[in-house]
Image (tube, coloured by chain):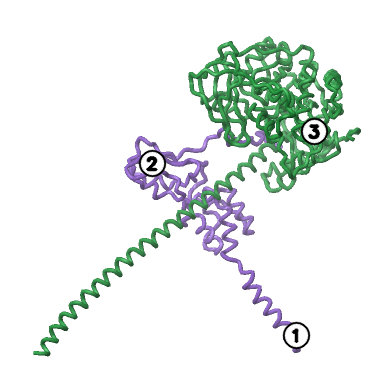
Amino acid sequence: MFDRLWRFHGGLKLPGHKQLSLSHPLATAPLSEQLIFPLMQRPGVTAKPLVAVGERVLRGQVIAQAEQLLGVPIIASSSGTITAIDEPRAVPHPSGLPGPCLIITTDGLDEALPVHPCADFRALSPQAIREKIRAAGIVGLGGAAFPSAIKLTPGPRRPIDLLVVNGAECEPYITCDDQLLQTQAHDVVRGAQILLHLLGLQQGIIAVEADMQAAETALRAALTQLGETRLTVRAVPVVYPTGGEKQLIYALTGRETPSGGIPADIGVICQNVGTTAAIYHAIVRGEPLIERIVTVTGQAIRQPQNLRVRIGTPIKTLIDYCGGYRAPPSRLIMGGPMMGFALTSDEVPVVKATNCILVASDREVVTEKVAQPCIRCGACAEVCPVELLPQQLYWYSRAEDLERCKTYNLFDCIECGCCEVVCPSHIPLVQYYRSSKSKIIQKNQEAEKAAIARRRHEMQLARKEKERQERAERAKLKKDALAKKKALDEQRAAAQSNDNSDTDELK
Amino acid sequence: MVLISLVFAAFGVLLGYSALRFKVAGDPIADRIDAILPQTQCGQCGYPGCRPYAEAIASGEADINQCPPGGEAGIQALADLLGVEPKPLNAAHGQEKPKSVAVIIEQDCIGCTKCIQACPVDAILGAAKHMHTVIAAECTGCELCVAPCPVDCIIMQPLMPTLDNWQWPSPQNRIH
């Protein structure tokens, strides 16, 4: 059915630098002395520790639970003793601010809780599978870390007809998905089978980039071996950002995700290959998500390679394992050169979203050039994969005209950075967009807070008014009672004097 | 002639009916002004709260530049709404400050309840002769509780950036 490819608007052909990390086989990072788990999973979603300092925990044990819908449990990735449950530590966040972390000091035994494998996932109901996925702490491993169980619950109003498993790793330098497909293609295919069962689908596409031949071959072999005919492998052209969910879906199906919408609105559910393999491990083997593959690469690292890493491992452990820095790194980046962000310390832990650690040398980092005025050349609009008008957005962002930014669909911007790469004036466009998005979000939060304050103030005024009325009423009652009593007294006195006069008259 | 009179009479009836049928309750302009005001309820504008100030602006009694917590952005929004020229904040009403919340130094609190009575949004919790505390999430930073405290145990703490409220900064390099 989907036997042709579509070409999405814009995008760029970027030098891949993929061989740097692919030339070395996949290795396993050593168990670090400390495992660090940031409690904050996204703004407003913070997990609550379930363990106490000094407690011994086993691999696979839930150590913190998030109450909010958009949170997942935090799971110990090795055995050891809890040494802190709320310690401020450097966390992977663009701000460089510290965040509360839970820390396990490992004992090296790597003892695990007993697992409960499931021989036949087809016997499980979709809801039971979703619950297992959530309990296993699975989030999107492509970098956004959105809880997978929620993404796999499109609801009755969004009929789904296609599964897309995203292995189109488009950002330069990153090869963790490529490496995963080369070594664990079977697990990815089995994970995709679970997703087909879960969503009640008959067709799915596993997408890779055209230059990932080894991965493609491994996938085809796995499909043949497992006799799986519902799934097909498609190689998409190497154009950044073809691995963006919405861009990939367009490239494969020609369906365009509406502005402000999600792929489920057009009948597609997309999952990263790493997530898909993790789902297989969680459902069939009963193993929660406690490790992932991380690409450690760049010209300033001695041995670039892909590593199987326990979640919570400090990045420094990975760098030491890769032979340390070749030269003082110009910048340490989590993610790729296009969409990643700079880290301020190598003490930060690997989290589920950590797909790549780019240890960039001076030559790799584009020295920040002085921005020149926008000459309205329109090159940015030509490469924008979302077909926005980057120069207009820049203009309104600079003028802090947030309403216009919204009108020009700022929130559809995926921050891919294509516009910035082609800008002849070297304007840091994405920074403007991110800043404007922050401002709009903050403004909305402030408006919400103001509405609450208004309500609380109105309630207080109403309460005070009620109290005043009640007081007045009580005073009135008292006054009335007094007046009544006085009147009665007077009446009595009058009656008495009347009696007296009566008797006087009688006399 | 008669026909025209009849038509006019019909319109008159229609207008009269519409005036009753589509009567707008309250003052819509004051509502829209109130929506822009920050709801700090601090009274720095000279009115006992944001709503009375909104009504005063709507009636032309007060100027748009009397709200320090709203700041320049608030004045700009009011100017846009009312179609007037924005003007700088009137210094007589105070200055724009970074957003803060009140914090009670709890070991110094004597439990007099004076701050509780002063708080316009019921954000202070406590009882007579018991320690009081500020519910930080509900505090608007109006500072009305600071003056009544007989032991000066309330301080205003500026909101620090945290992971939850951090914002991407605007590009530094603005020479373009």
SS state under label 1: helix
Label 1 to label 3: alpha-carbon separation: 71 Å
Viewer-nearest of discs 1 and 3: 3
Q: Which subunit holds the residue at mark 2?
A: B
Residue indicated by mark 1: B4
Residue at left 78%, top 39%? A160
**Closer to the camera: disc 2 or disc 3?**
3
Chain ID, mark 1: B
Q: Which residue is mark 2?
A: B132
Q: Chain of mark 3?
A: A
Label 1 Cα crowd, 10 Å radius (few <14 / some 14-19 / many 20+):
few
Which chain did the image draw in purple?
A: B
The image quarter containing residue A13 is top right
* Three-letter code for the amino acid on which mark 2 is drawn: His
From the image, tell me which residue sits under label 3.
A163
Q: Secondary structure at mark 2?
A: loop
Q: Amino acid at mark 3?
A: Leu
